[in-house]
Amino acid sequence: MLCSRKMFNFLIRKDVRKILKRKDSDAGERGRALEDLRASLFNELRTSDGAKRQQQRICGPTVALTFNFLVSVGIILVNKLVLGKVGFNYPIFLTFIHYLLSWFLMAILKALSLLPVSPPSKTTPFTSLFSLGIVMSLSNGLANVSLKYNSVGFYQMAKIAVTPTIVLAEFVFFRKRVSCQKVLALAVVSIGVAVATVTDLQFHFFGALIALAWIVPSAVNKILWSNLQQQENWTALALMWKTTPITLLFLVTLMPWLDPPGLLSFDWNRNNTSAILVSAVLGFLLQWSGALALGATSATTHVVLGQFKTCVILLGGFLIFGSNPGITSICGATAALAGMSVYTYLNLLNSQQQQPTKTSPRQASFSLSKSKLSKENSEPHDGKCNGEYV
């Protein structure tokens, strides 16, 4: 009893009460700071501009291209396994499963209020979204059909034709010009990849026709993804959420034409189903990483990344695993990598030349407030003191 009375007297002392009050106030400030941080992050996802800024901060060009590179290597190998060894001979339905899982995962994100908000509907016509949904279904569906009938080398060879198609389409529709140095670098890349993959050109006549039909939708798909994100403040996930239902609807119409009968008789055992689900998860990651890469760079850069992947796989197998693709293929892959290095250097040079013309909104507001202060204090400032260029 005496001990508890002493403890009570100690707690009601003035200095002890001040310490306890200070600790309560510190805890309250920390809680308010965490709430403010959480609210700011949540508010950024509630506006298309804020979500776009957050995507650019988290996923720059290097992160997006690396992410897409790793996923694309994995999905080509897994899809070849599913369509070959597993015996799932339904490439369009496989693509349908990919997009269905993607829509389901994005629906979960939307239910948790984690899906970025889309720009106002007035800024982007529905025809653009509808066109993107159609070319997405054609691009990915025909790619899987090509993988079913052709070798991976022929599939990569068909990608070479996508590069000039993109350059021509962007010039015709957007008046976007490519310098002569970049054209030469892209030509070296295309010729190098063609020489590197010439030893693995196993294809079926129907598969070759599908590969040719795939070129134009693939080019248009990349151009639309890049332009909608860079010019109209779309984020990758928001654009995926809007276009995936259109893609699913169009894939359903393609199934009777390009998939063989007998889907219900397929052996859906544990191993086969697991392989298909892994392919579907990689399909979602590929779509997301590809959209991030196209939003951060350009359609041509994204194609060059795909060709870089081909050369890395070929040279990696030769240097690490001792495979012998032949001196011709090695020389072609080396020449392609040299062309990619020149193309990357030219892009970096152009970005550095364009940097002085752009200032961030924070620097612009800083310059404005500084000019206001100079007017209030009647102190003239030199026009060169406008903040640092980025």
Image: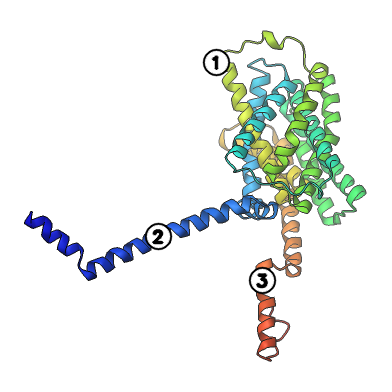
Measured Cα–Cα span from mark 3 to mark 2: 33 Å
Name the secondary structure under disc 3: helix
The residue sitting at 85% across, 56% down in the picture is: 179
Left or right placement of residue 59 versus residue 183 in this view: left
Q: Secondary structure at mark 2?
A: helix
Q: Which residue is mark 3?
A: 363
Q: Amino acid at mark 3?
A: Gln
Element type where label 1 sits in the image: helix
Q: Which residue is mark 1?
A: 270
The residue depicted at 66 percent of the width and 36 percent of the height is 286
From the top left corner, tell me how far across and down residue 80 is, in percent.
67, 24
Q: Earlier in the sequence, mark 3 or mark 2?
A: 2
- Residue 28, label in figure: 2
Of callouts 1 and 3, the N-terminal one: 1
The answer to whether 324 is drawn above or below residue 116 in the figure is: above
Q: Are marks 1 and 3 in contact (CB under 8 Å)?
A: no
| Residue sticking out furthest to the left | 2
Q: Nearer the viewer, mark 3 or mark 2?
A: 2
The amino acid at mark 2 is Gly
Given residues 79 and 94, the one toward you in this image is 94
| Residue at x 16% of width, y 64% of height | 10
**Which amino acid type is shown beneath numbered disc 1?**
Arg
Residue extending farthest right:
172
Mark 1–mark 2 distance (CA, rounded to whole Å)? 52 Å
Image coordinates of residue 275 in percent, x first then y, are: 59, 22
Task: Quarter of the image for the C terminus: give it.
Answer: bottom right
In x, y percent, where is residue 149? 76, 20
182 vs 149: above or below: below
> Quadrant of the rendered structure where residue 125 is?
top right
